[in-house]
Amino acid sequence: MYSFSREMNVMHDIERTTGVIRLRVYCLILSLMFFWPAAGQSQPPEFVMTEGVAAIVNKAVAPARDKAIDDALRKAVEQAVGTMVTSDTLTEQYKVITDKILAQTAGYVQRYKVLSEKAEGDLYRVKIQAEVGRANLMNDLRALGLLHALVEKPKVMVIMEEKVAGVFGTDAWEDVGQAESTIMQRLIAAGFTVVDSQTVRSNITRDQALRILEGDAQASAAAGLQYGAQVVVSGRAFSKNAGGRIMNTQLQSLQATLQARVIRSDDARVISSRSEQGRRAHIDEVQGGALAIRDAAERLSDAVIADILAQWRSEAYGRTKEITLVITGLVSYRHLTAVKQFLEKEMQGVRGINQRSFLGGAAELMLDYGGKSSNIADELANRKFTGFRLEPTNVTPSRVDVKAFVEK
């Protein structure tokens, strides 16, 4: 006989079973979220194309082919190493790198494929595309003490405009300096050298300060160069009452908004642009607003610091970086041609040159370079050009200024 209560019990059992399954699936998803490595945390592989060559002995092609592939794999790892250490380190520590790194290419090449191969007389040539694991390579180079940052942490200048509304319950506002001080504290704690903002404020014009606060990259870059800062952080912070009293108490809900841009002084390039919000409950609008700004500034500072370090690390460990070379005092275009030929053919680490301008004896070049800008300045200063010499006048991590002098 059909029992309605029995059917209900079965349905309840199904629901409980389904609930348990859902719970397990949810826990599995959470565990994957928390314990599975994030995609951005691992070093991406390096894809390299190289050619290997080996001699064919006694017409034995098979062993020559194997040796040619080994030669190509070794060159692939060597090329990847060249993107992580300075050219000077590569030269000075070549024996260590050869013995400890290049002797075990199998540990770094994750996979490869042969693109072409052929015998040419007594030689066998193989062209491959190899996928080199950067993570293991970087760890081993670091363990050998060969992996060093190519650029130091930059000196930073911070200029923030701040408005905390609600002074004495009116529409008036006050600048308590909370955003600026919080960002500076975070930068100092992270190991950066920070320019004294009060010194900067007392020596720049009001018009220049307004342009910086409004996000004018050129004005920020000029101020940074003036006070020896490679990076300028500027922006605005504002707090206000977000909705009156809270539940008939004296507490007020204060909301803060903070916006900031990070400019590199050498070329006025925007490194980072961030915004954050903070919220606090407080009986005093000014104090609560300042606390809300502090909360927003702490989060923004952490994000900005991460952006700055990411930019600096990419220049230190990446393939190359762009360095602006400005040459003044040129009396002939042939002198500029001589400099470009030296950089392209003799200067180690230069991957490319783009001439931006040549006007009135001044030239601007953009170099795609894998090393420190000071190396460029050293090489140009010591190079003996025919009929002229170059003297560096300004060297920053991303720019080199030199002046040409005619030799009689």
Image (spheres, helix red, strand yellow):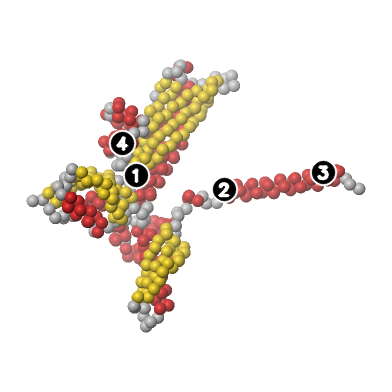
If you read the primary sequence from the N terminus, does the residue marked by circle 1 or circle 2 appear first?
2
* Relative height, residue 25 to residue 195 (above, below): below
Q: Amino acid at mark 4?
A: Gln
Disc nearest the viewer among 4 and 1: 4
Q: Amino acid at mark 1?
A: Lys
Distance (Cα) linking label 1 and label 2: 33 Å
Identify the residue position indicated by label 2 in the image. Answer: 33
* Residue 193 visible in image: no
Image-based side of 403 in relation to 191, left or right: left
Distance (Cα) linking label 1 and label 3: 69 Å
Identify the residue position indicated by label 4 in the image. Answer: 218
Identify the residue position indicated by label 3 in the image. Answer: 8
The circle drawn on residue 153 is 1
If you read the primary sequence from the N terminus, does the residue marked by circle 2 or circle 4 appear first?
2
Q: Which secondary structure lies at badge 3? A: helix
Distance (Cα) linking label 4 and label 3: 74 Å
Disc nearest the viewer among 1 and 2: 2
